[in-house]
Amino acid sequence: SQQGEEDPQALSIQEGENATMNCSYKTSINNLQWYRQNSGRGLVHLILIRSNEREKHSGRLRVTLDTSKKSSSLLITASRAADTASYFCATRRGSTLGRLYFGRGTQLTVWP
Amino acid sequence: GAVVSQHPSRVICKSGTSVKIECRSLDFQATTMFWYRQFPKQSLMLMATSNEGSKATYEQGVEKDKFLINHASLTLSTLTVTSAHPEDSSFYICSARDRGESFYYNEQFFGPGTRLTVL
C-alpha cells in the first residue's frame, strides 16, 4: 500500500519561480527519497535524506525532513521548463526489508 | 549513478499471448530487484520483490501465476505476463538495489519502464 501523500497534486509555475512540494507519511521511517519522473519514463533518483538528518541540498534542490510531523518538503529553486515532471516521495521503513513506499506524486509544470 | 535497462521499451501484443520483459543492471550487481506497475497519472505499485536465486515475493493481490518473475543472475531479472489481457496494459518499471554495506541505506535505481499494450 502507499505510504506517502504528496501535496499539491499539481503545481503550475513560471520559470524562475521556486516550487515547493510536500510529502507526509504515516509510520516511522529509515530514510525518505525524492524521485522525478518525466512523462512515460522511468524514475530518476534526486535525493535521499536519512531519518537523523533534517536538511539536505543538491544543486537547486533542497529537502527537509521533520520526523516529528512525519513530513518532508522538496524545494526547487529558480525552476526551469525542463523541471516539468512528476515528483514522488518514497519512504523506507526500518522494519521492512528494503522496499520503498511511494506517494501519489506532484505533477509540476513550469511555463517558459 | 548506476544504470538499469529494460527491454523492450514498448510492446503491443494480442490478448492471450505472453510477454517477457527484461531488466538488467548494467554496471553493478543487484541482489534484489523490484517490479512495479504504474497506471496513468498514478503512483508506482509494487508487484513483487525478486532476490537472486530464490523465488520472488509477491504483494497481496498480485497473481504469481500470471506475472512470472525470474531472477537468474545478479544482473538480470525477467517479468513474464502470461495470457495477457487488455486490463494488463500498463507501464511496468523495474528497479534494482546495489549491494552495499548498509542494507537500509542502499539506493534503488530504476529502469526506464516498459509500456505494455494488450489488444
Image: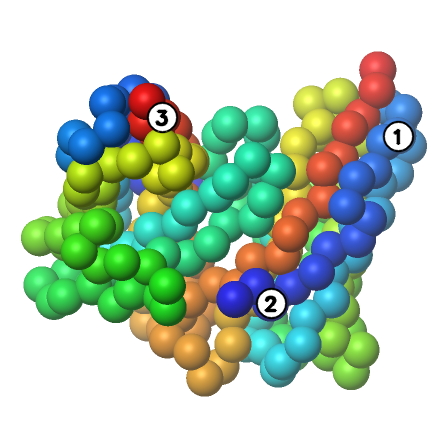
Q: Residue at x 57, y 49 (%)?
A: B43
Residue B17 horizontal/vertical position (percent): 16, 30
Viewer-side residue, B20 vs A66: B20
Q: Write down the residue under mark 1.
A: A13
To which chain does the residue with label 1 belong?
A
Q: Amino acid at mark 2?
A: Gln
Quadrant housing residue A84: top right
Q: Write down the residue under mark 3.
A: B117
Q: Residue at x 70, y 60 (%)?
A: A5
On-image quarter of the C terminus of chain B: top left
Gap between marks 2 and 1 measured at Cα: 27 Å
Residue A97 horizontal/vertical position (percent): 37, 75
Quadrant housing residue B21: top left
Q: Write down the residue under mark 2.
A: A3
Gap between marks 2 and 3 measured at Cα: 28 Å
At label 2, counting other C-alpha atoms closer than 10 Å, the crowd grade (few under 14, some 14-19, many 20 or more) is some
Circle 2 or circle 3, nearest the eye: 3
In the visual, does A25 lie left or right of A20? left
Q: Amino acid at mark 1?
A: Ile
Please give the count of numbered marks on the rendered protein. Answer: 3
In the visual, does A102 lie left or right of A61? left
Helix, strand or loop at label 3? It is strand
Quadrant housing residue A54: bottom right
From where the camera sits, is residue B8 visible?
no
On-image quarter of the N terminus of chain B: top left
Gap between marks 1 and 3 measured at Cα: 33 Å
To which chain does the residue with label 3 belong?
B
Helix, strand or loop at label 1? It is strand
Viewer-side residue, B87 vs A23: B87
